[in-house]
Amino acid sequence: MKFVLGACIVILTVMVAGAVFFVVPPAEGLGNLVRIAFLHIPAAWVSVIAFFMSAWWAAAYLRRGNIRDDARSFSSARLGFVFTLLATVSGAVFSKLTWGAYWNWDPRQTTILVLLLIYGAYLTLRAAMEEYNRRARVSAVYSLFSFLTVPFLVFIVPRLFFSLHPTPVLNGSGSVDMDPVMLVTLFAAAADATLIYIWLLLKSSRKEEKI
Amino acid sequence: MKPSTFQGIKLVLRKELMTGLRFRAAWAAMLMFSFTSLVCISFALGGTSAEPKLFAALLWILLFFSSLAGSDRVFSDEEAEGTLMALRVYAPSQAVLFGKMLYEFFVLTVITVLLLPLFIVFLGVETKEILLLLCTVGAGLWGISAAGTLLSALIVGAGVRSGLFSVLMLPVILPVFLPAIRLTEAAFGGTVVSLSFFGGIVLYDMILSVAASILFDYLWYAE
């Protein structure tokens, strides 16, 4: 199972990298800079998935008290932190190259920064707790408590700040406004990043359980 | 026999008020911290006029750090004095949470009542909408109290406490801060904003309070 998953990831990563550098055409207005999006969007996607999954396993831990749920919640948060960092840095580089500034408080930049702060706070709290049961319990509570910010990030932040960010792949009218080759490559990149997240999660949570 | 939740809230609040009055040094430290921070801001600006947006942001930064000066001790003091077990035995969990939350709100209100006029005087801020300002501050303090009380219970038993509370608090309280800064800016004569921002803060405060109530039991009964 682990070998099959690893093999799928290697094949998919090679295919996605080949498509990004040799097949995807330059985008109108963005030129070759659009290639950053194939790292940035999947990283942002996995950041959010990891956040949801961490909260999901935190709730499961509080309900059942199973250490496997705590290990998965923690591993998901740790991976989420790394993917959020990747999304933030790649987004900032894209922002500098297209809008002239690394940071301009775009709603999506704000959202990802809040997510980074939550992940950072969660990991700091965990590091500060010495006793195992207490550590698992308080981090599960914090994971769920910080999850309350999601409606704010989705509904309020976009009303607070002006956005220069390109429209999402699936825009407000429900239509997809993207070159078909780019779209297929983007979905493949997102699937690849999700598989990498699952593979690392399985590996990391098993190690955590043993500790 | 444990009292009812409502009776318990009253008793816990009374206990907190009496303990708070006994430890006047803690009050003095909190008030002096707030005042010193205000003086620092005033010195830094040096009497120069600034945009309402900057004043609004400075006011909320001041309120946030003032709240940090006392909120992290809500449960840590009980732990240090060995009274947590007595509270567990004699009071329902929800009475402890809401009693402490109300006390926290009271402390922050007292600090704000003293700090806000000084802020307006020292920085020469012109307040155009006093009712909007008071409602916004009230709603903001509610959120800080609700989140602060639960997070204070979280850090009991933490090996490193210095700075941990603020690290945990900021991401959770941002949904209160950002709209509150916009509303305060409007109250100081800046850009007019929709009152739905105020509704958003109150709604988030309610969600924080309900979530704190649900999650607190997992902390309280686990020890």
Image: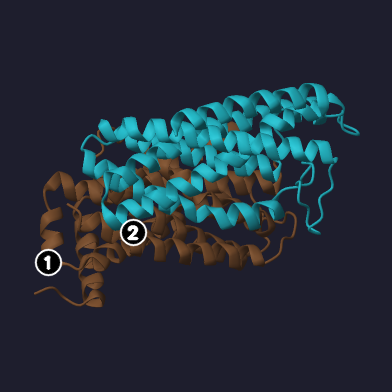
Chain colours: A cyan, B brown
In the drawing, does residue B184 fall left or right of residue B101? right
The residue lying at 29 percent from left, 62 percent from top is B97
Is residue A195 visible to the viewer in this orientation of the structure? Answer: yes
Q: Label 1's element?
A: helix
Amino acid type at circle 1 is Tyr
The picture places residue A50, in percent across and down from the top left corner, at 50, 42
In the image shown, does A151 or A183 lie closer to the viewer? A183
* Residue at image mark 1: B90
Residue A199 placement (x, y as % from top left) = 48, 33
Q: Amino acid at mark 2?
A: Leu
Question: B46 or B215, which lies in front?
Answer: B215
Above or below residue B25? Residue A95 is above
**Residue assigned mark 2:** B215
Please give the name of the residue rendered at 48% of the width and 44% of the height, measured from the top-left corner: B170
Left or right of A171, for residue A45:
left
Q: Residue furthest left?
A: B1
Q: Nearer the viewer, residue A16 or B191?
A: A16
Chain bearing mark 1: B
Q: How many marks?
A: 2
Chain letter for the residue marked with disc 2 in the picture: B
In the image, is A109 to the left or to the right of A202? right
Image quadrant where residue A183 sits: top right
Q: Quadrant of residue A186?
A: top right
Q: Is residue B33 above or below residue B175?
A: above
